[in-house]
Image (spheres, rainbow, N blue to C red):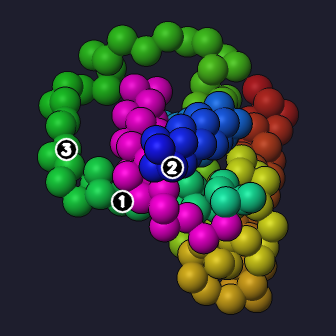
């Protein structure tokens, strides 16, 4: 009689964790892969692995870092077996909407995506996941100082690129 009761408590706790952290997991997955459907699949697979390994959770009061680590690993597994598709069309033949705000958002997403993984991961874990430097260091298995350096470099890279783009836009407006 004790085993079914423990299984029920385990299921209830897992359900609470899923409800609490699914939106954050999805947001992080989306920023890593930039595809809604792939992000949903990544979250689903991460939660499936979390359920299977639920007994291995070291800190039941704070499962978020553990779930984010599983999600990062699922994302890495995705690219181990990924076969890239490509389109061999000329750029002018592609049908792209000319929505100015969407283009700016797309440019920002591309800029973040262009960061090296070693800078992008801590940046996304902090900005989207809300993790502290020490939590990120633990997840990425490195030192807190290394994470602080990576975050600084990520911000500097983003800032300098954005400032360079703004300066170029101002020069082109002045010359027109």
Q: Quadrant of the C terminus?
A: top right
Label 2 sits on residue: 2
Mark drawn on residue 76: 1
Of residue 49 and residue 102, the one placed in the foreground of this image is 49
Camera-side mark, 2 or 1: 2
Label 3 sits on residue: 84
Mark-to-mark CA distance, 3 and 2: 50 Å
Residue 69 in percent (x, y) is at 52, 62
For numbered disc 3, what is the local secondary structure?
Answer: loop
Mark-to-mark CA distance, 2 and 1: 39 Å
For the record, the magenta segment spans: 35-59
Residue occupying image coordinates x 75% and y 38% = 169
Estimate how packed mark 3 is, as few (under 14), some (14 to 19) or many (20 or more) residues with alpha carbons within 10 Å. few
Camera-side mark, 3 or 2: 2
Camera-side mark, 1 or 3: 1
Would you say 27 lies left or right of 163 here?
A: left
Q: Which of the marked residues, 1 or 3, is nearer the chain's N terminus? A: 1
Residue occupying image coordinates x 47% and y 44% = 1
Would you say 55 lies left or right of 144 here?
A: left
């Amino acid at each position: 009689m004790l085993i079914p009761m423990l299984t029920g408590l385990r299921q209830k706790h897992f359900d609470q964790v899923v409800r609490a952290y699914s939106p954050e997991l999805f947001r992080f997955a989306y920023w890593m892969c930039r595809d809604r459907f792939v992000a949903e699949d990544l979250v689903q697979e991460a939660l499936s692995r979390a359920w299977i390994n639920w007994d291995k959770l070291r800190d039941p009061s704070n499962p978020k870092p553990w779930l984010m680590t599983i999600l990062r690993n699922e994302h890495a597994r995705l690219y181990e077996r990924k076969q890239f598709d490509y389109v061999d069309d000329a750029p002018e033949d592609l049908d792209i909407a000319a929505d100015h705000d969407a283009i700016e958002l797309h440019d920002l997403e591309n800029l973040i995506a262009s960061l090296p993984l070693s800078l992008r991961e801590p940046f996304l874990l902090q900005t989207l996941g809300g993790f502290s430097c020490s939590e990120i260091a633990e997840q990425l298995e490195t030192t807190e100082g290394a994470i602080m350096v990576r975050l600084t470099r990520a911000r500097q890279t983003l800032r300098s690129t954005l400032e360079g783009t703004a300066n170029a836009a101002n020069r082109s407006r002045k010359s027109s």
